[in-house]
Amino acid sequence: MATVTPNFNWPVPTSTDLVRDGATAIEALGDSIDASLVDLKGGTTGQVLSKTSGTDMDFTWVTTDDANAIQNSIVDAKGDLIAASANDTPARLAVGANGETLVADSSTSTGLRWTGQETVGKNAIYNSSLDVWQRGTSFNVTSDAYTADRWYAQRGGIATTVSQQSASLANFTYGIRVQRNSGNTFTTPIRLGQPLEITDAMRFQGKTVTLSFWAKAGANYSATSSALGVFLYSGTGSTDGNPFVSSYTGQATPINSTVTLTTSYQRFSVSVTLGSTVTQLTPAFSFTPVGTAGANDWFEVTGIQLEASAVATTYTRQNATIQGELAACQRYYRRFNAGGSSSYLGFGSAFSTTKITASFYTGTMRITPTTLDYNAINVADGVTGYASTAASLVAATSTPDVANVDFTVASGLTQYRPYFAQANGTTSYVGFSAEL
């Protein structure tokens, strides 16, 4: 009597079968083998067998590997990477540009992205965390003016307060507040921005850039829908400029957006791809008030970052330390403050009985200083001090490293004698600007 094989239960003859019974069993065996292996028929060159189901000997011919395996077709070019878009879901990450590095980014489909430099220097904004305030910490801006270092405020002659504020935010000590004065009824926009040099702007030519920042509003912030305008002005000129003073050549606004503020700090970001001919850039914020200003009609910003990236990356200062930020800012503005009520600020000699020329060693500024500001200066010879009645920058003999200043007194100087520009109190200073 026939028996069966242990794995597939194919019938086979036994040694005691009669010839006729054995032949029958052999025929049944052949039919069973033929039925079991039928899925192995067919197929074409290059195909492979794939399981159709969990049933034994259930196969099908396919042109590629199992659909659940990583296929050759998932990659398209040299340098492509295989990542994942979800659990058990492989996905292609296209190769990045030359010099880019791979970083984690939960906002992308693969959780990864290619990016440029992620270290100090990626941020083009000077004084981006508002640590440097050489000119003072509060300004009643009645005309366009630089306030915190490198930050320019504008509101067309209408009094606006710009001030340093404690940020009360992790990783940031200060923010800058732009406030419509209480009771003010003017509704012209208030702008705050930072004009960049061509050398800083040109590294973003043809690249996707992201402008990111933290911002919040006062309890009486009056802009419609609590909106804050976010701008990136661009130009194609060949000289450094300030679009708040005079429009750039070919001026455009590749970023012209709004964000909605609350009374708590939030981080916002806006991205855009710049044209290949951009040479000038100014990131800016704009507040368009309505009605009559309350006591807290203001916005604050800090942690401003402009970088070559499709998304906002971890914030870093442009320079590694606050000291580095100060040095970078002093390339544009340098103030000599009184170390004491009679400290010496500059050195020179008398050209007449009423005037000395004093030299100030500024370090290398962007250009030869173009403007001077000062307060409470005496001219002294170490014994006698004379109150200065006027001061003016001597542009003809100044350089980016040394600024010369004529100080005038009523009388009493000895011609050719050495004199000093001396502080006349703790609020004395002499400042030099090489700003855009």
Image: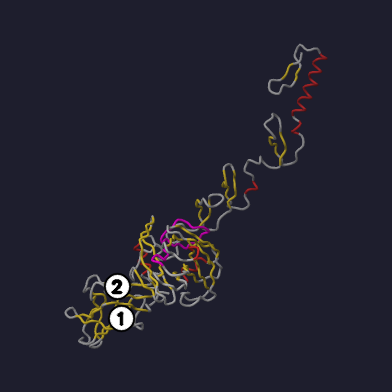
| Amino acid of disc 1 | Val
Name the quadrant of the C terminus. bottom left
Q: Is residue 25 left or right of residue 350?
A: right
Q: Earlier in the sequence, mark 1 or mark 2?
A: 2
Q: Please say if 170 is above or below 36.
A: below
Task: Note whether 88 is above or below 128 in the view shown.
Answer: above
Tally of numbered discs = 2
**Label 2: which residue?**
336
Q: Secondary structure at mark 2?
A: strand
Q: Is residue 237 above or below residue 305?
A: below
Res. 406 image quadrant = bottom left
Q: Residue 157 vs residue 270: left or right?
A: left
Judged from the image, the secondary structure of the residue bearing numbered disc 1 is: strand
Q: Which mark is residue 405?
A: 1
Tag 2: residue type? Phe
Magenta residue span: 294-317
Q: Quadrant of residue 157?
A: bottom left
The residue that appears at 83% across and 14% down in the rendered structure is 20
Q: Is residue 303 magenta?
A: yes
| Whole-percent x, y for residue 318 in the image | 41, 62
Q: CA distance from mark 1 to mark 2?
A: 13 Å
Q: Position of residue 407 (x, y in %)?
A: 27, 83
